[in-house]
Image: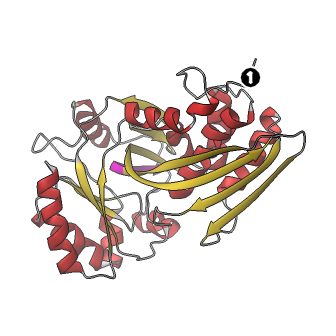
């Protein structure tokens, strides 16, 4: 029996903007954020041997306890009858625990790729339901590009593709506890969302380019104040990105990664050299590019091309009737 194989790149995300509002009755916090996929990606090397019995074997370096790859596949088994023997080698390129959604991207890669390879049809509504069960960031990776996230981040509304701006991603390797960051913000149970926060956020996302330079209030991340207080090195890195001409320069999620966007590749590449000299070899620097929704979907359709007949979204298996 023919073994089906695919090499699936699962791109990371940054938060171009992040506002933390009040705590909700369900214990989560009400968020307003702008997600954006970038070119840095994990790689999943997938093999599937068709058959009536389901099993999954995962090889990951480093090993990750409770990896969402296995959990995603098992939820597809329950929801859509996914079958066959699956072997996955996970090549981690996205720094873990850095606010870049690496684990969520890997989970979404399973939800997008396994049905196409395994010959099962799963409607987007069902994929979104599974994704929300797996984690707050996972639904966004079913869409890619730029999107506004509301609620706990699972309510998503697409934004137009932005220019493919080059950037630098800085991964200092500092652990930031997300629960501690929320606690330090001190957001109480809030029955009403302050109109000032909504107004400034709406003005930002209604612009054609949410990263436009010098138009009204720029992007912000509410976690920066409390996280930089506990980890001053992160604030210093953001200031250095700004000194190199990055706009915006922000922390992603609750940290600890930071990003800076530039007007062109030459400007970015020069800044990359200087930052490398200034920050030292112990801090990881990655050149990245914003990845729009059209590019994100094209990437997935190319990766799954042997198993998809039509350019539908989500990718649909040629093995389905």
Q: How is the image coloured?
A: secondary structure
Residue 19 appears in the picture as rendered: no
Position of 6 relative to 236 (above/below): above
Residue found 52% across the figure and 22% down from its top: 311
Residue at the location (20% across, 53% down)?
A: 248
Residue sitting at the far top:
321
Depth check: give the residue in front, 312 or 183.
Answer: 312
Image point 37% across, 52% down: which residue? 14
User: Badge 1, how many Cα within 10 Å: few under 14, some, many 20+?
Assistant: few
Q: Which residues are magenta?
A: 15-22
Residue 66 at x, y percent in the picture: 70, 63
Which residue is outermost to the right? 52
> Residue beneath label 1, please?
320
Residue 212: tell me if it is visible: yes
Describe residue 116's horizontal placement relative to residue 198 as left or right.
right
Give the SS element for disc 1: loop
Residue 243 image offset from top left, x and y in percent: 10, 66
């Amino acid at each position: 029996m023919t073994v089906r194989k695919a090499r699936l790149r699962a791109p990371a995300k940054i938060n171009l903007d992040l506002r933390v509002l009040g705590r909700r009755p369900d214990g989560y916090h009400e968020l307003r954020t702008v997600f954006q996929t970038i070119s840095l990606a994990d790689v999943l090397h997938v093999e599937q041997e068709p058959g009536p019995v389901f099993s999954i074997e995962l090889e990951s370096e480093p090993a990750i306890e409770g990896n969402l790859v296995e959990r995603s596949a098992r939820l597809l088994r329950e929801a859509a009858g996914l079958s066959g023997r699956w072997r996955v080698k996970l090549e981690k390129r996205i720094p873990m625990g850095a606010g870049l959604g690496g684990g969520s991207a890997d989970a979404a890669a399973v939800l997008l790729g396994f049905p196409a390879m395994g010959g099962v049809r799963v409607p987007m509504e069902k994929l979104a339901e599974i994704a929300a069960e797996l984690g707050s960031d996972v639904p966004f990776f079913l869409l890619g590009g730029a999107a506004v996230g509301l609620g706990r981040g699972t309510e998503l509304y697409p934004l137009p593709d932005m220019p493919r701006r080059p950037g630098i991603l800085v991964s200092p390797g500092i652990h930031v506890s997300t629960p501690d960051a929320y606690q330090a913000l001190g957001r109480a149970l809030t029955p009403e969302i302050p109109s000032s926060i909504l107004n400034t956020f709406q003005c930002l996302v209604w612009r054609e380019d949410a990263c436009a330079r010098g138009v009204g209030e720029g992007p912000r991340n509410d976690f920066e104040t409390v996280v930089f207080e506990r980890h001053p090195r992160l604030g210093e890195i953001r200031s250095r990105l700004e000194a190199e001409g990055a706009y915006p320069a922000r922390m992603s999620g609750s940290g600890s990664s930071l990003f800076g966007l530039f007007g062109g590749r030459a400007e970015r590449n020069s800044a990359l050299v200087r930052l490398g000299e200034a920050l030292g070899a112990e801090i990881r620097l990655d050149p990245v590019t914003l990845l729009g929704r059209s590019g994100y979907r094209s990437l997935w359709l190319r990766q799954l091309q042997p198993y998809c007949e039509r350019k539908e979204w989500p990718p649909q298996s040629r093995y389905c009737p």
